[in-house]
Amino acid sequence: MDPAELFAQLRRDPDVDAPDLVAVDATDRLLLDEAAADLREHPEGVAVLDDAYGALTLGAVALHGVTRPRVHQDALVGELALARNAERVGLADSYDGLPLGPELVRGTRVVLARAPKSLHALRELAEVVAADAAPDATLYVGARVKHMTHAMNDVLGLAFTDVSATLARQKSRVLVARGPRPVEHTFPRCREDDDLGLVVCAHGAAFAGAKVDRGTRALLGVLPEAVPEAAVALDLGCGTGVLAGELARSRPGLTVFASDQSAAACASARATAAANELADRVEVRRDDAAGSLPEGSVDLVVCNPPFHVGTTVAENAAERLFAGAARVLRPGGELWCVWNSHLSHRPALQRIVGPTRQVSRDRTFTVTASTRR
């Protein structure tokens, strides 16, 4: 298949759209080109990590003859987009989706990865590959040049004996790591927050790591006021599960759900709940904007929404979560949301959920409560 023909058919759906967001970019193309010889030499020993919307997986299969690559995508919308794109181009059931772990990379000779946003996520990725891929495996990690640092080479060097960089092309570059070292898995990492007395656990790709970010602290400060009579609560976009853990700990009679589309976030939230002996109180679900919960089944939703898609600022990313909250809230239920004060979320909250009041505000963060119509 011609690359242009293949890539022209790929879409971001169901992820958010914006004029500067695409389904295939220069990093995808460069990764496939740099790894082409290895892919053709080892077509049955390939893994793909954090493929954004399917370009790497489907490109490896259609352009280089790779057979059933093993694929892990942290983002659920990425999984859904890959499945829809595979169907669209006639390659459904051409790959195997797996969690980030030994089975994903065991015995593989070639691993393609889009560089994650954080060095912690890159380290966990490198540890997994080095520990279980074939001894002669090669890891290709691609990113936009503006998002790459020398620290990425250092992180890969902890798990591989040889790390080099390709020439840049269209503002993208690929790091090539060979010679896996013997390594131990260092994730999830856990630490106790002195102010909360809560142990926070985090896998590499979890936002804020094993710390409590300032936005979450702002919401925690007013959490006792949030629908005190609630019987069912949801931590939407739960990250490491701090809000869910605090709700479960402080309200013994409350049924608490935590959901996130990130596999790393869900694994982190489960680890946080277990570390605080709350595993039987917090049910963690990986889904897209609370899609697995019934309509009108929740009294309180708490949310610290993102405003990035990858490394791109996209304020409408939060609106998917607002719509999810509106769907699962019962009439009269409330969404308590914290957001950066410079953003303009309040009109969207009022339009999507219902009447919205300000609970607290400082120069950095605003907390609002929106009542479901």
Image (cartoon, rainbow, N blue to C red):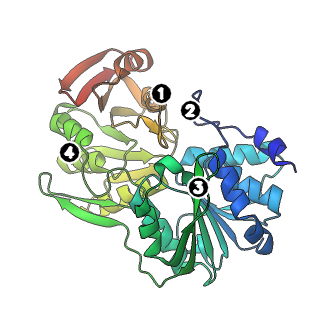
Q: Mark 1: give few (<14), some (14-19) or many (20+) Cα within 10 Å.
A: some
Q: Earlier in the sequence, mark 2 or mark 3?
A: 2
Q: Earlier in the sequence, mark 2 or mark 1?
A: 2
Instruction: Check disc 2 and report its element: helix, strand or loop.
Output: loop
The reply to whether dot 4 and dot 2 touch (C-beta < 8 Å) is no
- In the figure, 351 relative to 158: above or below? above
Where does residue 167 sit, x and y in percent of width and height?
A: 62, 58
| Depth order, front residue of 239/257 | 239
Instruction: Check disc 4 and report its element: helix, strand or loop.
Output: loop
Q: Which residue is mark 3?
A: 173
Between the residue at mark 4 and the residue at mark 3, the CA separation in whole angstroms equals 49 Å
Q: Earlier in the sequence, mark 4 or mark 1?
A: 4
Residue depicted at x 76% and y 73%: 44
Three-letter code, disc 1: Asn
Q: Mark 3: give few (<14), some (14-19) or many (20+) Cα within 10 Å.
A: many
Q: Which residue is mark 1?
A: 316
Q: Which residue is mark 4?
A: 251
Q: Mark 4: give few (<14), some (14-19) or many (20+) Cα within 10 Å.
A: some
Where does residue 190 sit, x and y in percent of width and height?
A: 27, 65
Between the residue at mark 2 and the residue at mark 3, the CA separation in whole angstroms equals 26 Å
Q: Earlier in the sequence, mark 4 or mark 2?
A: 2
Residue depicted at x 65% and y 80%: 107
Q: Earlier in the sequence, mark 4 or mark 3?
A: 3
Three-letter code, disc 2: Val
Instruction: Check disc 1 and report its element: helix, strand or loop.
Output: loop
Instruction: Check disc 3 and report its element: helix, strand or loop.
Output: strand
Q: Which residue is mark 2?
A: 16
Is residue 50 in view? Answer: no
